[in-house]
Image: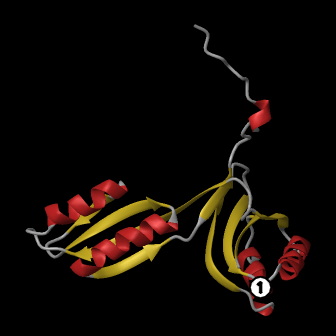
Amino acid sequence: MKRIITATVQDRSGVLNRVTGLLQRRQFNIESISVGPTETEGVSKMTLVVEIEDEQRLEQVTKQLNKQIDVLKVSDITDKAIVVRELALIKVASSSQLRSEINGIIDPFRAIVIDVSKDSLAVQITGKPEKIDALLELLRPYGIKEIARTGLTALLRGHQPQVNELTHYTLSK
């Protein structure tokens, strides 16, 4: 089962290597990893998508990650209310005659052209991985020259009121 794990870590040399080394020693395949600074100076957040067989192994790896030097917090956020996004840059073969056709394909995906050359277009798209995969499938017949994907990055959603917390209104005549 695929799990989305976030780790808040000190922004120091070697932290990424220790985290990925631990997962590699436990034979977990990291499908994607993204790392970047947080709102706190000197602290980074890692978002890892990992294939894990069962809950017991998930708990084991979470505990072991929490024990790592410079790891502040580890969370499995897969089953929580989250916002997930990915960025992809796609270079597509394109002649001047095909550019408007390709623009018509990318427009509904809210993708944008970020570079144009004589024989190609570079497109930027952000969204859920399924959205990016769908656009890639539509662009394949034109000839994809290169793809660069960031991997998932995720945040917990803000507090959402429960149904019983909502104020009930009635319409009066």
Front residue of 9 and 105: 105
Front residue of 22 and 40: 22
Residue 58 lies in quadrant: bottom right
Toward the front, the furthest residue is: 173
**98 displayed left or right of 61:** left
**171 displayed left or right of 70:** left
Q: Residue at x 64, y 59 (%)?
A: 154
Q: Residue at x 76, y 38 (%)?
A: 162
Toward the top, the furthest residue is: 173
On the image, numbered disc 1 is attached to which residue? 53
**22 displayed left or right of 90:** right
Question: In the rendered view, how is the structure colored?
Answer: secondary structure
Quadrant of image for the N terminus: bottom right
Q: Is residue 128 above or below residue 39?
A: below
Residue 165 lies in quadrant: top right
Label 1 CA crowd tier, 10 Å (few <14, some 14–19, many 20+)? few
Residue 91 appears in the figure? no
Give residue 170's position: percent from left, percent from top: 66, 17
For mark 1, give the secondary structure: loop
Give residue 67's position: percent from left, percent from top: 91, 74
**129 displayed left or right of 98:** right
Q: Is residue 162 above or below residue 28?
A: above
Q: Residue at x 44, y 64 (%)?
A: 131
Q: Is residue 30 above or below residue 134?
A: below
Type of amino acid at the residue the image marks with label 1: Glu
Give residue 54's position: percent from left, percent from top: 81, 82
